[in-house]
Image (cartoon, grey):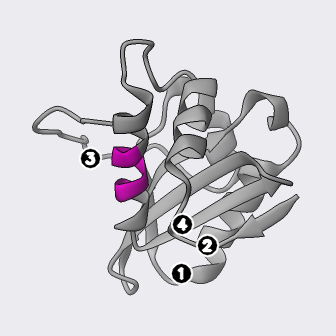
């Protein structure tokens, strides 16, 4: 597995990864939605990706002020690579790049155990949202 830090990820590869993990519905236009995903990743503070030759096996993006707060978004690992330490390595790279920030993540129940093993605890405050997520 090769890990990269480039923020310019191929739109089609991102779309395929999101589809593989069930985050894209069948009615999404692959080209249009892939380009939107690529813009989201490119405009993040940091992006870490895992590659098996030309296959995007996993990716994660970070938004941070670099000093106090960091938020992890879109940790996705293709099901064919799950259980092989890819998610853990992607998270480790986030923590290594910004070692002194407080990390936050919105997590689906199926991924809670992964984040708890990385030292995350349930937050005491409530997460609130406004607007609809286009991705």
C-alpha separation, residue under disc 2 versus residue under disc 1: 5 Å
Quadrant position of residue 90: bottom right
C-alpha separation, residue under disc 3 versus residue under disc 1: 23 Å
Q: Residue at x 60, y 69 (%)?
A: 94
C-alpha separation, residue under disc 2 versus residue under disc 4: 12 Å
Which residue has dot 4 on it? 47
Q: Residue at x 48, y 37 (%)?
A: 107
Residue 64, percent from left and from top? 37, 73
Mark 3 vs 2, N-terminal side: 2
Mark 2 vs 4, N-terminal side: 4
Query: Element at badge 3?
Result: loop
Which residue has dot 2 on it? 95
Residue closer to the observer: 34 or 99: 34
Q: Is residue 17 above or below residue 124?
A: above
Tell me the number on the disc at residue 98. Answer: 1
Of tags 2 and 4, which is closer to the observer? Answer: 4
Residue closer to the observer: 96 or 24: 24
Instruction: Give the quarter of the figure containing the N terminus.
Output: bottom right
Q: Is residue 97 left or right of residue 108?
A: right
C-alpha separation, residue under disc 1 versus residue under disc 4: 12 Å
Q: Is residue 95 above or below residue 51?
A: below
Tell me the number on the disc at residue 125. Answer: 3
Circle 2/circle 1 CB separation < 8 Å: yes
Could you classify mark 3 by the number of other residues whose Cα lies within 10 Å: few (under 14), some (14-19), or many (20 or more)? few
Question: What segment is highlighted magenta in the picture?
Answer: 35-40
């Amino acid at each position: 597995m090769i890990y990269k830090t480039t923020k310019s990820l191929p739109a089609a590869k991102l779309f395929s990864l999101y589809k593989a993990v069930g985050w894209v519905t069948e009615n999404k236009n692959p080209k249009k939605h892939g380009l939107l995903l690529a813009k989201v990743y490119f405009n993040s503070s940091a992006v870490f990706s895992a590659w098996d030759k030309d296959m995007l096996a996993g990716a994660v993006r970070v938004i941070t002020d670099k000093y106090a707060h960091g938020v992890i978004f879109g940790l996705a690992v293709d099901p064919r690579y799950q259980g092989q330490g890819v998610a853990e390595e992607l998270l480790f790279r986030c923590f290594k790049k910004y070692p002194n920030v407080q990390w936050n993540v919105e997590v689906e129940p199926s991924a809670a155990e992964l984040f708890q093993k990385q030292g995350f605890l349930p937050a005491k405050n409530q997460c609130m949202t406004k607007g609809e997520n286009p991705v």
